[in-house]
Image: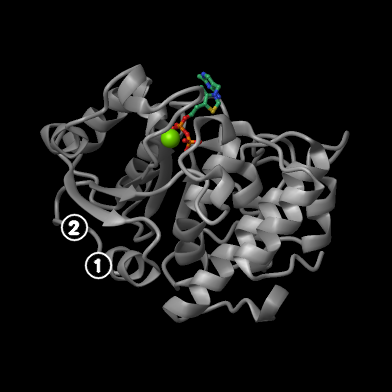
Amino acid sequence: MTKSLNGVGMDQDSPGKLKQEANWIRLSAMTMTHNAQLGHTGGDLSSADILAVLYFGGVLRVDPSQPNWPQRDRFVLSKGHCSGAFYSALAARGFFPPAQLKTHMEPLSMLNGHPDRNKLPGVEANTGPLGHGLPIAVGAALAARMRKESWRVFVLTGDGELQEGSNWEAAMTAQHYGLDNLTVIVDRNRIQQGDFTENTIRMEPLAARWSAFGFAVDEVDGHDSAGLLDRFSHLPIQPGKPSCIIANTVKGKGFSLAENQPAWHHGVPDDEQLAAAAVELGVEVGW
Ligand SMILES: Cc1ncc(C[n+]2csc(CCOP(=O)(O)OP(=O)(O)O)c2C)c(N)n1
Ligand SMILES: [Mg+2]
């Protein structure tokens, strides 16, 4: 297997390295948003540590040289608006050349604003309309179960996204079938589009709700690479039940100006802000 940008590794990277990889994902996503003058900075930044641990912590069993390897674990980015972070993780992991990140949102690019599985290797589901990723993931997990296959399904949702009722229909189905090959990760950054979740439609008590829907639940610091690695390495949380990991995060994490600011949900960094982010994150994009 090859190494890619910034020495980003392919197997089980150390927590320190994972933090660096997450920061690279952050700056890469911000650069894409800057170039396209469109994107979702806040949610890209909150999810970067989760994505880095999944792709570089040896959690997801995937092989970029065979993106359709039948035994692969499936990852569904249900919060498909955060394609900047997702595409950066996929490129760094070797699913496609990082130079392609330059084409984000250009006409005829494979890198649409929302991920398209028919265009880009490594994308398992077309997402963007919120509330669709978990239903798709439940179907995939059920397919593995019916075929007696050992691959697992991971799905990353937003927290505001959970206001879509389709998630709870899917959750009921997952618990009915006891899909312990399914892990839902909630990017609990407490902000949705326009405001804080608790000012819009209250999400608490979120852990108790997942529990009531039949999931085994745990809460983690979504920016603690070591903690995420430990949690993701010991799944399912409880045999016989689907897992839900509530990752407490900060929207805009890593770029102070954007942290915890609803306006940065789809804020676009200007030249100066991008340069400041590079300094703060301590990485170079290199593509
Ligand atoms: C069905 C649907 N309604 C509205 C939107 C527009 N939209 C895009 S992102 C977003 C807010 C999502 O908030 P959250 O799930 O908390 O995501 P994050 O904070 O991780 O960015 C909305 C309403 C959409 N993509 N899909
Ligand atoms: Mg949110």
Question: Quick one: label 1, few (<14), some, or many (20+) residues within 10 Å?
Answer: few
Question: Is residue 286 visible to us here?
Answer: yes
Q: Nearer the viewer, residue 94 or 246?
A: 246
- Identify the element where label 1 is drawn: loop
Picture quadrant where residue 141 is located: top left
- Identify the element where label 2 is drawn: loop
Amino acid on which the number 1 mark rests in the picture: His
Q: Which residue is mark 1?
A: 234
Is disc 1 in contact with disc 2, using a CB cutoff of under 8 Å?
A: yes
Q: Which residue is mark 2?
A: 237
For the N terminus, the image quarter is: bottom right
Residue 233 x, y percent position in the rendering = 31, 69
Amino acid on which the number 2 mark rests in the picture: Ile
Q: Is residue 59 above or below residue 8?
A: above
Query: Ligand 2 sits in which quadrant?
Result: top left
245 relative to 268 in the view: left or right: left
